[in-house]
Image: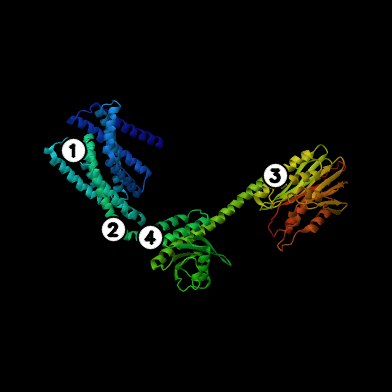
Amino acid sequence: MSLNRYKISANLNWWIIGTLVFSIIFYRILFFSNDSHFFFIINDLIVITLIAITILVIIKKIRQTNPHPSALVLNSGIIVSFIFLIILFSEPILEVLSQNSTTINVNPDLFQNIILSFYSLMFLVITSYWFATLKELYFYKRYSAKNTYFYLMVVFLILTSVASLLFRGEKYDFINHTFEIVTAILIVFNSLKISWIAFISKKEKISLLILSIIISTLFIINLANSSQNDFNGKILANFSPAFYTFYTLVLLYGGIYFAVLFFTTLFHIPTAEAYDRKAKEVSSLQYFSKLITQVLDFDELAETITDIATKVSSADSAWIVIKNSKSQKTIANKNIAYVDAEIINNYLLQSGVCENITETKLCSLDKFGEKSRLSEKYGSVAISPLKSMNETKGYLIAARKNDFIFYDEDKTAINTFADYASVAIENSLLLEQSIEKERLEKEFDVARDIQRKILPLKEPESKNYSITSVFIPAFEVGGDYYDYFEIGNNKLGFIIADVSGKGISAAFIMAEVKGIFSSLSRMIETPKDILIKANEILLQTLNKKSFVSALYGIIDTEKEELSFVRAGHCPALLVRDNKLETFKPSGIGLGLTNNSAFTNHLEEIKINLKEMDTLVFYTDGITEAKNKEMEDFGEDRFNNILVNNTSKSVSQIANEVIKEVTLFSSDHHQYDDITLIILKWHKKNNIDGV
């Protein structure tokens, strides 16, 4: 709403300005031969209105862009230079235009009047800009509300301009001169009030010193070349006596203001360096007080610290040394080679020169024996401890080249800055750890969600077998996966797999594996061919560090047989007549080698099923579960549980396994997923209750 309101207001301003410009041109065309006093009164009323609105619009534009005073000074300098060239070459150019008017059958007086009107309007806009600029410079960085003298000057500028129109003739000269003298005095008085010069840097002051004297000179030259006896002065006085007076007074204001600016800047130069330094110190401490409460990348923060440290201490170089348990690391080198920083570090920290310091210490490098090895001639350094919980975590080091040394006031500034930097670094490290922990937790949540969704919701049912499965995820999500696939009316495909790695990457690979086997189980009926094709697909998608161990089998209820292949997975177990048999056909993990080698090493096994056969498939989360002595649960314990409970239902057998594993590893956290599939074969219809 406010943006639309601004657009309407801006458009209205330009519409008014355009209307006033058109009115002036039309009025002067209509009465171009009229030289009466009444003509000039009407003319100047329109001109004064146009000047006022133009100044207000320009001031509004300047405030919107909020330029630095140096930019305003530079812009004024460019424009006053342009006007100098215009005044210098205007007479011959306008004479040529007047001569050309006869060749195109235009009334020479009318054509000349139009050209001179546009010429004068150009000066009107530029003069308005000068005044708006001088006004903004006057109020820049002024905290006092006493602006009476400036507004009084504005009033007398208007009165003097209007008086030049109303009191024309020699007998009224004393009135005009009185107004002019008072206005000139007010201009001088207001020109002396330059408060913003103290708030700019030494470099900017030196630039202003040069610019101000040039601009002041050009204003005075333009004023001298605009007298009523000169060509330019005659044109502007003819266009509008009120504007001509305003124009000359603004030129006078510019000449005096920039002359005063020159001397003011000159007097501020000696103290500029000290002011710049104090300003940097204050701004740096303020900046760091904000950094302490912000989340920053540690490397970015370290670079910021060394960058500001060079400014606060006026040092040539700075760097940070971070202490680890057994070593130290140099980071965030600012304007110094890494090798040079390491040489100075060895001198300061390993030689004992700055051992156990509690505050900033100033050290001369005059007695440094290896100084000749440095690529730059450093003369002195300031080293400050970076503390956390009364423990020194590192050091902030600043260095100066040649014979420039640090003083006590430098020590105070660096010491204060180092205290802020210590807090900021500690906060950054803590926040970094917190963010990393939160990121891992979110990653685990996503991985668990993916894992939960891709596992089967229920067990397949058949009159020929009973089957159960158990899946217990670890906190650090692994990549265990199992699934069932109905193949026709008399076949059941199943897979149990373990993806290398943990977290979200393993979960995504699991999802990919599910999609591959869900598709292949519908198209291929041989376990070996399915794994060969799966390996071919995974070779194209898995990186070199990832692989999948898997066991894929098909139970044929009509033939009463199980055929399966193993790709680097845990062996299949068969409990028959209270005896356990291990089946470990050869095979390489999926995604580890090319398809030719994978195929050559892949072996398919078939088992003829008998009444009450118990088949067990699992992942290494069971056998590698650890107790507090870091012993593995092992295959022997696992096998004994299976044999001792073979007469029980599949769900009871699974419960016994999980109970024993849980008791064994009760004093140690579970670090890997546990997956278990148990199938019991029934030749007759005496289905085991599951």
Which label was assigned to residue 277? 4
Q: Is mark 2 on a helix, strand or loop?
A: helix
Which label was assigned to residue 109? none
Q: Of circles 1 and 4, which is in front?
A: 1
| Residue 13 visible in the picture | yes
Q: Where in the figure is residue 465, as x and y percent of width and height?
A: 83, 43
Q: Of circles 3 and 4, which is in front?
A: 4
- What residue is pinned by disc 1? 164
Q: How far apart are marks 1 and 3 (CA)?
A: 90 Å
Drawn side of residue 582 relative to residue 32, left or right: right
Q: How far apart are marks 2 and 4 (CA)?
A: 18 Å
- What residue is pinned by disc 3? 512
Is tag 2's residue or tag 4's residue first in the polypeptide sequence?
Answer: 2
Q: How far apart are marks 2 and 3 (CA)?
A: 76 Å
Q: Which amino acid does label 4 sit on?
A: Arg
Q: Where in the figure is residue 446, as x and y percent of width and height?
A: 63, 47
Q: Where in the figure is residue 380, as x and y percent of width and height?
A: 44, 68
Q: What element carries label 1?
A: helix
Which label was assigned to residue 267? 2
Is tag 1's residue or tag 4's residue first in the polypeptide sequence?
Answer: 1
Q: Which amino acid does label 3 sit on?
A: Glu
